[in-house]
Amino acid sequence: MTTTPLTVVKCGGNPAVDAAGICADIAHLVHEGHSIVLVHGGSGEIRRLAGELGVPQRTLVAPDNVSTRYTDPATLEVVVLALTGAVKPKLVAELARHDVPAVGLTGMDGGMLRARRKSVIRSVVDGRTVLIRDNHSGRITTVRTELPEALLRLGYVPVVSPPAIDEHDHPVNVDADRAAAALAVALGADQLLLLTGAPGVLADLDDPTSVQSTHRISPTGPPDPSATGGMALKLIAAREALTGGVGTVRIADGRTLAPVSQALAGAGTTVRIAPAEEPVHSSRETEIRA
């Protein structure tokens, strides 16, 4: 592994996230000696491409209020095309523009991310819980680190995205936030930064200034009900990283100037795991630290 502290950065797929700004900031940090792995999603590009190809999109909402993308075979093809054919090349090219060598990878490359396909998913439809059986998504079970470690030793920035490879050696969609967490744990990263289209975890979803400086999540079970949609999955990913030994996890704004540097300096929301005997609560500070 590298001898310098390692940071895993997840670049969200929200179109509002400044991917070019994130790459420029990563380049600045790499030139200063930082070791960084960049993980990305691509929700905006997936929606755009699905619309062009006429592939209907659907969101599954679990009983615990966590939402995920319904990945039927056609959507899985769209996911692979969007991430590997559009989002990833732009990120690699943007890093190259700043004289940073980068290598684009999916979780399938070298068997880096292994996942078990979910045979059944519970989803709430019209107030009833139904079972979805044709969803091509999975949960990461194994991470092989040889490939990203070799690239880091050689001075490259690995740029990683779904899909992973399942138990039958087929591609399977996995959540990019949880993939970033799994990589951070396996690589022994010091920090995981989840950059998104929000300033952090909000105390009031209608008030973008109500950023929680710290959010404590229960060691088990669903996150706080106030965290909905993608934020709920980010909190789950944060918990998985923390329980796996990652020292610091922050959810921060990917739309700002120098977003990675700001997050490293403490901007956004620092996620911590609440002691089992302690009621889950969050700081209600409303400052956004620059």
Image: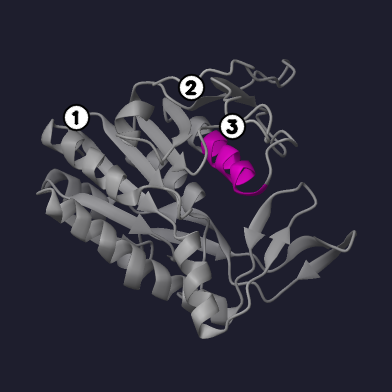
Q: Which mark is residue 118?
A: none
Amino acid type of the residue tagged 2 in the rendering: Ile
* Residue 238 included in the magenta stretch of the image: yes
Residue at image coords 60%, 71%:
71
Q: Quadrant of residue 210?
A: top right
Q: What secondary structure is the stretch in magenta mostly built from?
A: helix
Q: Position of residue 19 (x, y in %)?
A: 34, 50
* Residue 97 included in the magenta stretch of the image: no
Mark before the other along the chain sequence, 2 or 1:
1
Quadrant into which the C terminus falls: top left
Is residue 246 positioned above or below 51 on the image?
above
Residue that numbered label 1 is attached to? 4
Residue 171 seen in this snapshot: no
As helix, strand or loop, the secondary structure at mark 1 comes to: loop
Amino acid type of the residue tagged 3 in the rendering: Pro
Label 2, label 1: how many angstroms apart (C-alpha)? 29 Å
Q: Position of residue 197 (x, y in %)?
A: 49, 44
Residue that numbered label 2 is attached to? 288
Residue 197 appears left or right of 264: right
Mark before the other along the chain sequence, 3 or 1:
1
Packing grade of label 1 (10 A; few <14, some 14-19, many >=20) is few
Query: Contact (CB < 8 A) between labels 3 and 1?
Result: no
Residue that numbered label 3 is attached to? 208
Packing grade of label 3 (10 A; few <14, some 14-19, many >=20) is some
Packing grade of label 2 (10 A; few <14, some 14-19, many >=20) is some
Residue 12 seen in this snapshot: yes
Q: Nearer the viewer, residue 227 or 219?
A: 227
Label 3, label 2: how many angstroms apart (C-alpha)? 10 Å
Q: Nearer the viewer, residue 290 or 181?
A: 290
Mark before the other along the chain sequence, 3 or 2:
3
Q: Position of residue 285 (x, y in %)?
A: 59, 15
Residue at image coords 71%, 62%:
60
